[in-house]
Image: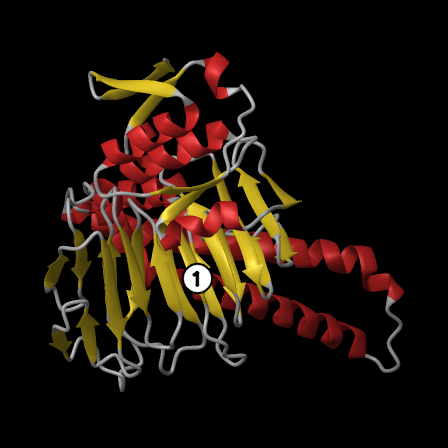
Amino acid sequence: MNNNLLHIKTLVGKYIDGTASIEEIAAIHVWLNESETNKVAFTKLKQECKQKQQSLANADWLKFEQKYGNAVKPNKKGKRLLGFISIAASISLVVGVSIHLMSNIQDNYSTILAEASAAEVPEKTTINLSDGEQITLETSHSVVEVDEQGKQILLEDKQVVEEIGDAESSKPGINQIIVPYGKTAELLLADGTKVWLNAGSRFVFPDHFNKQPNREVVLIGEAFFDVSHNADQPFKVITDEMVYTVLGTSFNIQSLPNSTSVSAVLVEGSLQVEKKTLLNKQKVILKPGQKSQFLAKQDRMHVTNVNTAFYTSWKDGYLMLDKNRLGKLIEQIEQFYHSELVISHELINVPTQLSGKLLLDEDPEQVYSALCDLTGMTYRIVADKVVFEKQ
């Protein structure tokens, strides 16, 4: 097997167990489109990976029985063996269901995510509907509403798009909204959940949640969620590395493309944060005022207490100024406008007395000027870089 096919086999294995990143899913997507032979090979590789997973699972059950089997004293002949068969069957069922659920998630969203990871961010907020229709919105903060049955979508100019979904179908249509840099969007989902999308974000969502065991959506970028409570239908936000599960709460998630960390900040309620893998899972339950941060290089999750306003104010059109973190403010501006800000190490580490709000504007130079007014700096644009200097 050549090196390329070995690499693809590794990616397919990660796809099957739910650990493939968006970029890796995109690589599989490109490879599949190269030839019909690759599609046949993909089917074969999937079967091999699933068989390997089952073989590993059986080996684990055998180790379990060897370690603890003698400790079980049966009351009747044959009862002990039957008990272990039941245990193995139960555990196999749990693993099988987990793989099945993760596969469903991947099957529903992988094509859209693969295309999204390779596509450029548009200049206007764009909605790609499940039927192939594309809608562009003009305003700097777009508002979109989906009705309870997924039958229509209401846009900010009161335009109604009819029959975008079929509430009677067990498989809802999958839509996507893409927010360009320098703009934001607000989305009301069919279940009443409100989602605020930050600049440069992509959000994949179904047109309805009817007859679904979970309410599942996918995020690339940053968003604030105010989730409608439904104890019988948990709400799951799926990102490149993590799965966030809630019943009803408000929180912010940042999962930026090519970032080495993924974070969540909980404002109200309770939020389960889980690394998206079947093995060596890391899971925490956040309390209000806490932030979880998963660092990919360390493969570790950290939880800290924070002032949530510094992480969520963008949804209201401004950034909170933290007198101890000018560097963090610079990072937020860079992300929002997809620009590169250059500021000397000396200036960025000097404690400032800034407080209050920095209003976000459709014109980034208005924000650069406001930042200079607050800090006493000047700025100039050099080769697409914004350079901040002392006056």
Where is residue 2 shown, x and y percent of the image?
Answer: 31, 30
Q: What residue lies at 41% left-to-right and 43% top-to-bottom?
A: 319
> Amino acid type of disc 1?
Phe
Regarding residue 116, the answer to whether it shows in the image is yes
Regarding residue 55, the answer to whether it shows in the image is no
Comparing 117 with 369, the one in front is: 369
Q: What residue lies at 78% left-to-right and 56% top-to-bottom?
A: 66
Q: In which quarter of the image is the C terminus?
A: top left
The answer to which image quadrant residue 209 occupies is bottom left
Q: What residue lies at 15% left-to-right and 49% top-to-bottom?
A: 124
Where is residue 64 shown, x and y percent of the image?
Answer: 74, 57
Dot 1 surroundings within 10 Å: few (below 14), some, or many (20 or more)?
A: many
State the SS at label 1: strand
Residue farthest to the bottom, as pictured: 168
Q: What residue lies at 35% left-to-right and 50% top-to-bottom?
A: 317
Q: Relative to residue 292, is residue 116 drawn left or right?
A: left
Residue 205's place in the image compared with 342, above or below, is: below
Q: Relative to residue 150, is residue 272 drawn left or right?
A: right
Q: Relative to residue 201, is residue 303 drawn left or right?
A: right
Which residue is denoted by mark 1 in the rendering? 225
